[in-house]
Amino acid sequence: PVECLFQFLCSSNNNIARIEKMVWTLAGYGERLGEVGGFVFHRFPTVERLARVSEQELREAGFGYRAKYVVGTAKELMAKPGGGAKWLALLRDRELLEVIEGLCTLPGVGPKVAACIALFSLDKNQAIPVDTHVWKVATQYMLPELAGKSLTPKLSIVVADAFVAKFGEYAGWAQNVLFIGQLPAKKLVATEVTSETAKPTKRKRATKMVEIQA
């Protein structure tokens, strides 16, 4: 849960490339495991280690306002009974609503991020992280009467309940599949094209973008 929590703190209003960079930066504070293919791998740092990182240090690494959330959450976890890692692990034994409420006490964690952490690392299979993509699925297929309305915290609960009613015990994972389905289906990939010249020993190489259907 520790790694999942801090990765989702990095995801706030962010893109995949920057999230990946931030996670690698955080990992660098952990124990070095080895080097493979020129890449150095680390064990993800403990809560104790992250609590010693300064906000300024993370801001200089490009975390922006998320730096205070990472540092604040690490320190908040350290103050939890039994330590942060133990407190997070014990959330697995709590009811979903209690888990969400507990996670939302941490800096930078709102209902959506809390639901993500609950689903992906705390065995809460009915947790539904509701964002604009999930809202679109819900209003298109399950709650058409809400189409055209703006997503609010209250309607997020309505959407989550609708997913659970529709998909049951593993509604969170069904939501995740549908969420992925809402992402852009067409991608551009680089492929190397070889064109023959008059002499067989000489070949011109060019790279073009090929559109594929995901």
Image (cartoon, rainbow, N blue to C red):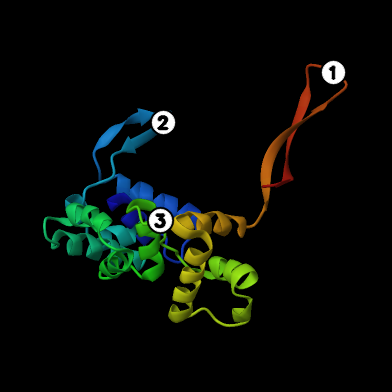
**Which residue appears farthest toward the bottom when viewing the image?**
149
Q: Which residue is mark 1?
A: 199
Nearer the camera: disc 2 or disc 3? 3
Residue 147: give x, y in percent of width and height.
63, 79
Badge 2 element:
loop
Q: Nearer the viewer, residue 79 or 189?
A: 79
Is residue 105 left or right of 196 when viewed as pictured?
left
The 10 Å Cα crowd at callout 1, few under 14, some 14 to 19, many 20 or more, is few
The residue that appears at 29% across and 52% down in the rendered structure is 1
Residue 87 position within the rendered picture, expressed as x and y whole percent measured from the top left:
19, 57
Q: Residue at image x 39%, y 63%? A: 115
Precedes in sequence: disc 1 or disc 3: 3
Does dot 1 land on a helix, a strand or a loop? Answer: loop
State the mark number for residue 38. Answer: 2
In terms of depth relative to the viewer, which is nearer, 11 or 154? Answer: 154
Q: Is residue 80 above or below residue 206?
A: below
Mark with earlier residue (2, 3): 2
Sequence-wise, the earlier of marks 2 and 1 is 2
Measured along the vertical axis of the image, is residue 102 above or below residue 212?
below
Q: Which mark is residue 125?
A: 3
Mark 1–mark 3 Cα distance, whole angstroms, equals 62 Å
Give whichever of 187, 182 is nearer the camera.
182
Residue 148: give x, y in percent of width and height: 63, 81
Residue 198 drawn above or below residue 122: above
Instruction: For residue 62, say whether it is visible.
Output: no
